[in-house]
Amino acid sequence: MNLGTKLFLVAWRAIDKFPESLVRTLAMGVSDLMWLRRGKGVRRLESNLRRVRPKAGPRHLRRLSRMGMRAYTRYYIDAFRLRSFSADQIRARCRVEGRERLEETFAAGKSAVLGLGHIGNWDLAGAYASLEISPVTTVAERLNPPEVFDAFLEFRQSLGMEIFALGDEGVVRGLLSALRRPPRIVPLLFDRDLSHNGVEVDFFGEPARMAKGPAVIALAGKSPLFPVTFYHERLRGAARKAAGSPWGMVLQIHPEIVPGEGEREAQIHSMIQRCADSLAKEIAKRPWEWHMLQRVFTADLDTPPPVTTGGGDASAPKPTTKP
């Protein structure tokens, strides 16, 4: 086990032993340091954000990427500390828009597939859903080294989620089996193609490669597919006290994507395109919530991330909300 892995696991095991305000302050400092160093991940984030705000200048992109890195760091803070949250705190940190869509699905005796992007905190969402909506079955990307993956796997299972590892045998069979046990939700990420077997969609006016898993599973399981997005909101007063945090998260359940006419592959492409449209609409409102530090756009798949010039200053256009 290398030093980086040891430090990660120490943080994983110890972070909930310290006051949240202290952890957040230190973590934001680390986030800003990573942003200032402008490594490959930050440059890739800025490249992706450039597609979201094509008219933005370098200073504005730098400001957005700083906010994006802070949102990315907040995800890990909340994920690491989630084990220490009470059920009431988890409930207080989340609210749902469009919940009636899932309730109508369950009332009809069906389970649902959810299409997610790298936005918000899906671990917090999964914990909340397990408490308040329905059991959760999903797939987790295998991480290296294995000790980190095992820690995340054990953690997610402790929250009541059923987890399959991406690439293992029987994953599709397990997901379809879960859909046959309503009410249940099967959330799957789609805005990054890890299998290299995805589909090319239009995303912010450019071709992008995305995973087709949510559409494939929904069609095979004869289950409805709902795009889902998240965003953070400031909590105040009694809500903040109940949550034990200045931040809450909103889960948005978008309208069902009904398969169109045509062959199966055409249906899959259409469904993922509409998932991408829903995700793009929400990212455009709050670009900093999309913590995508990897290649998505087809033009970037074989090229290094560009270097963004210029730093933030008071004259740069400012986003309306800060994380």
Image: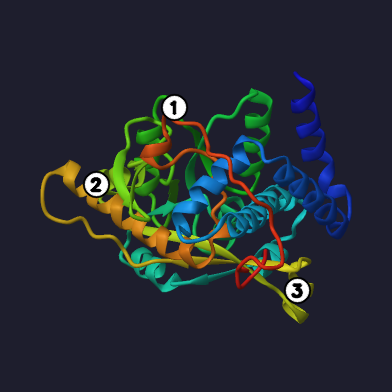
| Residue 217 locus on image (x, y percent) | 32, 44
Q: Is residue 204 above or below residue 322?
A: above
Q: Is residue 53 above or below residue 79?
A: below
Q: Are marks 1 and 3 in contact (CB under 8 Å)?
A: no
Write the residue at 45% across / 57% down.
Answer: 54
Write the residue at 46% across / 64% down.
Answer: 284
Mark found first going from the N terminus, 1 or 3: 1
The answer to whether residue 223 is visible is no
Q: CA distance from mark 2 to mark 3?
A: 42 Å
Left or right: 100 as drawn, with respect to 235: left
Q: Which amino acid type is shown beneath numbered disc 2?
A: His
Residue highlighted by disc 1: 167
Q: Quadrant of the C terminus?
A: bottom right
Residue highlighted by disc 3: 240
Q: Quadrant of the N terminus?
A: top right
| Residue 289 locus on image (x, y percent) | 57, 58
**SS under mark 1:** loop
Q: Which amino acid type is shown beneath numbered disc 1?
A: Gly
Choose between 37 and 272: the one closer to the eye: 37
Write the residue at 82% across / 34% down.
Answer: 10
Q: CA distance from mark 1 to mark 3?
A: 40 Å
Mark found first going from the N terminus, 2 or 3: 3
Write the residue at 65% across / 51% down.
Answer: 310
How many residues crowd around disc 3 within 10 Å: few (fewer than 14), some, or many (20 or more)? Answer: some
Q: CA distance from mark 1 to mark 2?
A: 22 Å
Residue highlighted by disc 2: 269
**SS under mark 2:** helix
| Residue 150 locus on image (x, y percent) | 64, 30
The answer to whether residue 23 is visible is yes
Q: Quadrant of residue 167?
A: top left
